[in-house]
Amino acid sequence: MRKDKPSILRGIVTGVTAGIVATLIMDQFQKLSSAGGKALEKQKKLADGEAPSQINREQAASEQKAAEQEGSTEIVARKIAEVTHTDLSKEEKKKAGQAVHYTFGTLMGVVYGVSSELLPEVTTGAGTAYGTLLFLAADEVAVPAFQLSPSTTDAPATDHLQHWAAHVVYGGSLELVRSLLRRIL
């Protein structure tokens, strides 16, 4: 394969690999940014004079509530299980939700990889424009439209910003890995 000539096969290979890696990086970013946000919230409450034991109880209750709520990928996993007449335990649903997330991230990586082979402008902003587009199309439009999450107006602005930042990280990671692999292939 000549590297200067577009190749759909190369786009698929780089897209699959970059999609998996970018989804992994996005997951880690979300975990870190969530933990950082909780720490900042705790510091603010401490500064406002709230008792540490009360703060810890509130955080535990909040984390318990979040753990009990189904995320959009878990809803998709549950609906797939229902179609196949399969019952999922909470733990299985969490794992299946992760599988849905990684499958979607990988497929979007393939779309990006092939698109960037055929139309290099797709890589604008080193992948961050693609990450933003994915955030808008998936998180802000499709997920609420398919009732996989509450309406976008029901979520606080900080949640939207955190999800957008995670998708920018996904897009930037996607382009970094894709471009490195493309040099090799």
Image: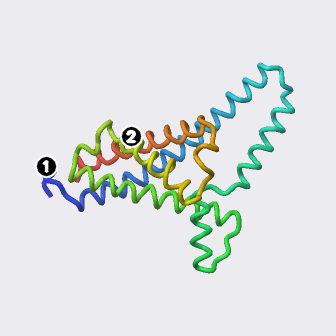
Crowd band around label 2 with a 10 angstrom C-alpha radius: few (<14), some (14–19), many (20+): many
Q: Amino acid at mark 2?
A: Gly
Q: Is residue 92 left or right of residue 130?
A: right
Crowd band around label 1 with a 10 angstrom C-alpha radius: few (<14), some (14–19), many (20+): few
| Residue 90 rendering spot, x and y as whole percentages | 70, 64
Q: Is residue 182 left or right of residue 175?
A: left
Seen at 28% across and 45% down, the residue is 122
Residue 143's place in the image compared with 161, above or below, is: below
Q: Which residue is mark 2?
A: 172
Pick whichever, 149 or 171, lies toward us. Answer: 149
Q: Amino acid at mark 1?
A: Asp
| Residue 149 rendering spot, x and y as whole percentages | 60, 54
| Residue 162 rendering spot, x and y as whole percentages | 55, 38
As drawn, the residue found furthest toward the bottom would be: 85
Q: Which mark is residue 111?
A: none
Where disc 2 sits, the SS reads helix
Where disc 1 sits, the SS reads loop
Pick whichever, 160 or 64, lies toward us. Answer: 160
Seen at 67% across and 27% down, the residue is 40
Q: Quadrant of residue 161?
A: top right
Q: CA distance from mark 2 to mark 1?
A: 22 Å
Q: Is residue 51 left or right of residue 87?
A: right
Seen at 69% across and 31% down, the residue is 39
Q: Which residue is mark 1?
A: 4
